[in-house]
């Protein structure tokens, strides 16, 4: 019986020491991070003519047999916007909310001539 008790005590002590070791490691670790990429979505509440956009707006790729949306690539800020017929936009590549807002507003100006109110 004494051996079982000693084994349990030793196991308990080892577990306690391991927990203390983990706690001390957590006190030491101070992560640093940097925002590299924000993904944001927006809805314009209009229908977009993706064919016309691809023909008339620079830096837009549209291959409907490969992907249902058009891709608008902005150079400054460096961002890619996925454009869908239903007026939804997915914006990727921005590093701040301000860049997201600027990119989407810039896209709206480019897309407005090719937008129409959705059918009821």
Image (cartoon, rainbow, N blue to C red):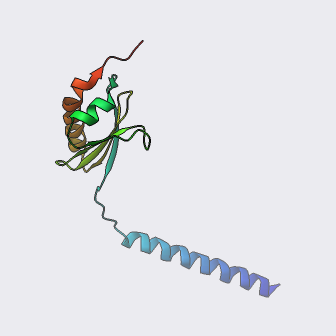
Q: Is residue 66 left or right of residue 55?
A: right
Q: Residue at (34%, 65%) from the top-left corner?
A: 31
Question: Measured from the top left, where is residue 47 in percent x and y?
Answer: 35, 23
Instruction: Looking at the picture, tell me which residue is in the foreground, 18 or 87.
Output: 87
Count of labels in the image: 0
Q: Quadrant of residue 15?
A: bottom right
Instruction: Looking at the picture, tell me which residue is in the foreground, 13 or 41.
Output: 41
User: Extreme bottom residue here?
Assistant: 3
User: Extreme right residue here?
Assistant: 1
When the figure is inspected, residue 114 is found, relative to residue 107, above or below; the finding is: above
Question: Measured from the top left, where is residue 46 in percent x and y?
Answer: 33, 22
Q: Residue at (60%, 81%) from the top-left corner?
A: 14
Question: Measured from the top left, where is residue 1 in percent x and y?
Answer: 83, 84
Instruction: Looking at the picture, tell me which residue is in the foreground, 21 or 41.
Output: 41
In which quadrant is the C terminus drawn? top left
Q: Is residue 45 left or right of residue 21?
A: left
Q: Residue at (68%, 80%) from the top-left corner?
A: 9
Q: Quadrant of residue 67?
A: top left
User: Extreme left residue here?
Assistant: 76
Q: Quadrant of residue 51?
A: top left
Q: Is residue 8 left or right of residue 34?
A: right
Q: Residue at (16%, 48%) from the top-left corner?
A: 76
When the figure is inspected, residue 65 is found, relative to residue 95, above or below; the finding is: above
């Amino acid at each position: 019986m004494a051996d079982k008790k000693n084994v349990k005590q030793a196991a308990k002590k080892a577990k306690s020491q391991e927990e203390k070791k983990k706690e001390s490691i957590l006190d030491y670790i101070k992560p640093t991070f940097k925002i590299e990429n924000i993904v944001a979505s927006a809805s314009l509440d209009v229908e977009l003519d993706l064919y016309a956009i691809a023909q008339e707006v620079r830096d837009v790729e549209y291959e409907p047999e490969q992907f249902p949306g058009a891709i608008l690539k902005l150079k400054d800020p460096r961002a890619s916007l996925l454009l869908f017929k239903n007026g939804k936009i997915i914006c990727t590549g921005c590093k701040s909310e301000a860049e997201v807002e600027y990119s989407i507003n810039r896209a709206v100006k480019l897309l407005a001539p090719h937008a129409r109110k959705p059918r009821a």
